[in-house]
Image (cartoon, helix red, strand yellow):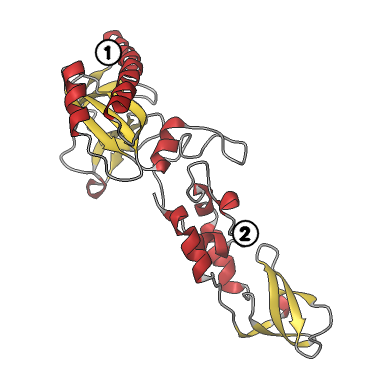
Amino acid sequence: MATVIGVRFKNVGKMYYFDPGNAQLKKGDRVIVETARGIECGEVTMENREVADENIVQPLKKLIRLATKEDLARVEENRKREKSAFDICCKKIAAHKLEMKLVEVEYTFDNSKILFYFTADGRVDFRELVKDLAGVFRTRIELRQIGVRDESKMLGGIGICGRPFCCSTFLGGFQPVSIKMAKEQGLSLNPVKISGACGRLMCCLKYEQEAYQDLLRSTPKVNALVMTPDGKGTVIDQNILTGMLTIQMEKAPEAAPKTFHMKEVKVIRDGRIQVNKKELEQLRSLEKD
């Protein structure tokens, strides 16, 4: 076991472990630590806690110090510089006629590097742009191509639910989301209804997936052949949350279907959740990062 603190460098980002030494820190404390990309200023999001060695990425770097007023002033100055650098880079991109969209600029705490995050449909040859930017800022320049999900996380916004994006408020990272999840939850496979502002499947499809999978194990699927108190029938619709099934009776195929609770029927042959291959190919782009 080792005593660590959790530090985050963005409002909604991954938390990293650091060795606090003899310092006893509280949530919200600003600290100066050494990272893979240099000296950085972060915020403590997890107070001193013992963590198993196997959960720690070695070597565990030590806390340098609590952030001083001068450190925090430098952070604020860097934020101002980032706005200026953003405008300059946009002009340089236009001058070089590159098919890319600048999303965010980030100065490292010690000003040893400036990172420019951008999106693009394909690969971009930005070597001349890097040389141009290095000539202006006289420091190391790094351009990073990000996906549309990362763009939404950085920029933020309001989702179709009327709330701020999950990715920009509390999600530390992205989890895989698939068309199969939408189908299992009985959602319409209309891209407008199941995709977020980023144009990819909504992250919230993942939240209740385990509950739906558990219910699906015990609920007869559409096209399942079942035995009901009134005889055999085929499930034509289901509500897995209430357990109610709409069943077309075998002995009266022309009559109106009947409704039974799943506990009232016995499955003879279960159905399968199917997605039309052509429809699936059309929606496949929604699963990309």
| Residue placed most toward the observer, 102 or 77 | 102
Q: Is residue 262 visible?
A: no
Separation of residues labelled 1 and 2 (CA atoms): 51 Å
Q: Is residue 236 visible?
A: yes
| Residue placed most toward the observer, 25 or 196 | 196
Q: Which residue is mark 2?
A: 188
Q: Can you name the residue that lies furthest to the bottom here?
A: 251
Q: Amino acid at mark 2?
A: Ser
Q: 194 above or below 105?
A: below
Q: How many marks?
A: 2
Q: 164 above or below 263?
A: above
Residue in the picture at 24% in, 20% down:
109
Q: Position of residue 37 (x, y in %)?
A: 19, 31
User: Residues at badges 1 and 2 in contact (C-beta under 8 Å)?
Assistant: no
Q: Secondary structure at mark 2?
A: loop
Mark with earlier residue (1, 2): 1
Q: Which mark is residue 71?
A: 1
Q: Residues within 10 Å of mark 2 (few under 14, many from 20)?
A: few
Q: Position of residue 27 (x, y in %)?
A: 39, 26
Q: Residues within 10 Å of mark 1 (few under 14, many from 20)?
A: some
* Front of the two marks 1 and 2: 2
